[in-house]
Amino acid sequence: MTEHIDKTRLNNDIRYRFDFISKLIDFSQDDVTRLNSLASIITPLLPMVIDSVYKKLFAFDTTKRYFQMRNDGFETFTPNKELGITLDFVQTEFRKDMLSVYLKSILTQREWNDSFLEYLSRVGQIHTNKGGSASINVDYIYMNALFCFLEQLLSDIVWNSEGLQYNDKRECMRAISKFVWIQNDLLTMHFSSTWNSGSTCQSIPIVKLTKCLFI
C-alpha cells in the first residue's frame, strides 16, 4: 500500500523529513549502531582525515578564499605574521576542531533524536547567510564536494581495517554513505527556497552556532 507523504511537512518539519528520507534509503538504528562501532577505528585517524580535508580545500583558490575572510567571532583578532599566526591559520584551526567534534558526534551519537537532527540541520544552515552571519555564504557545490571527499576518506579507513570482516565492512560503508546523504539533504534544504528556515523540530531550542563550521 502506498504511503502518503505530506510535502508541506517535508519543508517544515525536520523530524518528518528525516523519517521520510530514512525510509527511502533504508537508514535504521542498525546503521546508527554500525557508525557507533566504527568510533574506535576511525577516531584515532581523525587528525589524518581532517588534515586531508583541509589540504584539499586549500588546493583551490575558490575554496581557500573562505579561510581568508574575517568571520563572526574573529572581528578583534590581531595577526602576528612573525609567529606565523594569520587570520586564515586561526580560522582554519577552529574549523578543524569543529569538524573533529562533528565527526566524533556522528560516530558516538546513539540516538538520532530531535536535538541531534537540529544540530545536523545547523551544520548546513551555518554555511549560508541564513545562519545568522552575512559574512559567510558558501556555494553549495563546495559543501557537496566536501562531503563526497569525506565519505571517500572514511570508507577507505573501513575498507583497510584489519579488524573487520568483509560483510561488516560492506555494511559499515553503507552506513557511512547513508549518513552522508542524510546530512547532504539537511544541508541542501538550506540552499533551497522551499524550506521554511524558521522551522525546527518541535519543543527544542535551536542549536546556537555563531561561526562557520567547516568552510
Image (cartoon, rainbow, N blue to C red):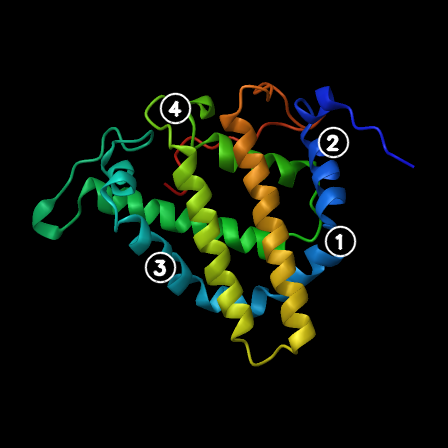
Secondary structure of the residue carrying numbered label 2:
helix
Position of residue 199 in the picture relative to residue 84 (left or right): right
Q: Is residue 22 above or below residue 204?
A: below
Mark 1 vs mark 2: which is more N-terminal?
2
- CA–CA distance in space, label 3 to label 2: 35 Å
Labels 4, 1: front one: 1
- What amino acid is found at the position of numbered circle 2 in the picture? Tyr
Amino acid beneath label 4: Ser
Horizontal and vertical percent for residue 54?
A: 33, 52
How far across and down, in percent of the image, does residue 103 sit? Answer: 51, 53
Residue on which the image places disc 4:
133
Name the N-terminal-most of marks 3 and 2: 2
- SS at badge 4: loop
User: Label 1 is placed on what type of residue?
Assistant: Gln
Q: Residue at x 42, y 47 (%)?
A: 146
Quarter of the image where the N terminus is located: top right
Cβ atoms under marks 3 and 2 closer than 8 Å: no
Q: Residues within 10 Å of mark 2 (few under 14, many from 20)?
A: some
Which labelled disc corresponds to residue 16? 2
| Label 3 or label 4, whichever comes before in sequence order | 3
Q: Secondary structure at mark 3?
A: helix
Residue 34 placement (x, y as % from top left): 68, 62
> Where does label 3 land, which residue?
52
Residue 85 appears anywhere in the view: yes
Q: Amino acid at mark 3?
A: Ser
Instruction: Sort mark 4 into few (<14), some (14-19) or many (20+) by Cα contacts within 10 Å.
Output: some
Which residue is at 51% across, 75% downward? 160
